[in-house]
Amino acid sequence: MAYVGGDLRVEANMDYNGLAIALEGNNSDRWGPNGACPGVPMYPNVTDALNAYDGISITNTLAEEINHLHQAALTAKGYGSMQSSVFSTWFIPSLGQWKLAMQGLGGSFTEYTITITQQDLQKVGLTNMWENLKEGAYTASVFNDAEVYRFIPNRSLTDNHGSKGLASPCYPFIAFKYGNGATRNQDDN
């Protein structure tokens, strides 16, 4: 779990302030735009993509797209069920949400690079993630009408975008509301 905390919203226009990452990614449902996807913003500037926290809305838009199937969005939404107003549905995270989650796990961000160690991931149970992220994980952030941004630890984000044919996993995230009398354990990250 990656607690982001405070008054920072982890999804635009929603009251969630925490993120959790699925322990396993899905390698079979690759996604990428096949031309423009109505309702899905493009971020040709990496700074804009890093500041956009819109994975839930993009995943919902992709899952509802009737002109072409976005199986990765449907798979992410169906990852699990949390019947509570505290949790969002599972979603493909935006590049900005990956940044927030990695910072919440002890990583840092400088010069368009999200730095995280294998030990940071292992201490919260993400033991297989390090190997799986060598080629990057898909994000919901669209670079252009043929490519999406990928999160690859310790590598500049300015060139981390690729088409849907790449063997990158999708790691679903879930957002949650933290606070309102809840206590945070010292071991929570």
Image: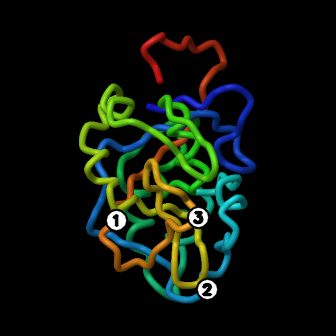
Sequence order check, earlier mark of 2 and 1: 2
Does 22 appear above or below 107? below
Q: Nearer the viewer, mark 3 or mark 1?
A: 3
The Cα–Cα distance between marks 2 and 1, rounded to whole angstroms, is: 21 Å
Report the amino acid beneath label 3.
Thr
- Are dots 2 and 3 in contact, CB under 8 Å? no
Q: What amino acid is found at the position of numbered circle 1 in the picture?
A: Ser
Neighbour tally class for label 2: few under 14, some 14-19, many 20 plus, Cα within 10 Å: few
Looking at the picture, how far across and down is residue 79, in whole percent?
A: 35, 52
Who is closer to the viewer here, 137 or 176?
A: 137
SS label for mark 3: helix
Disc 3 designates what residue?
158
Q: Residue at x 66, y 47 (%)?
A: 11
The picture quadrant where one finds residue 31 is bottom left
Residue drawn at x 39%, y 53% is 171
Q: Residue at x 50, y 34 (%)?
A: 107
Q: Mark 2 is on which residue type? A: Ala
The residue labelled by disc 2 is 36
* Left or right of residue 27, residue 95 in this image: right
* Closer mark to the observer between disc 2 and disc 3: 3
- Which disc number belongs to residue 168? 1
Q: Position of residue 18 (x, y in %)?
A: 57, 34
Q: Earlier in the sequence, mark 2 or mark 3?
A: 2
Q: Residue 78 placed where, x, y %?
A: 38, 56
User: Would you place residue 94 above or below residue 178 in this image?
Assistant: below
Q: Determine which quarter of the picture holds residue 175.
A: top right
Could you give the CA–CA distance between mark 3 and mark 1, rounded to whole angstroms?
17 Å
Residue 37 percent coordinates (x, y): 60, 81
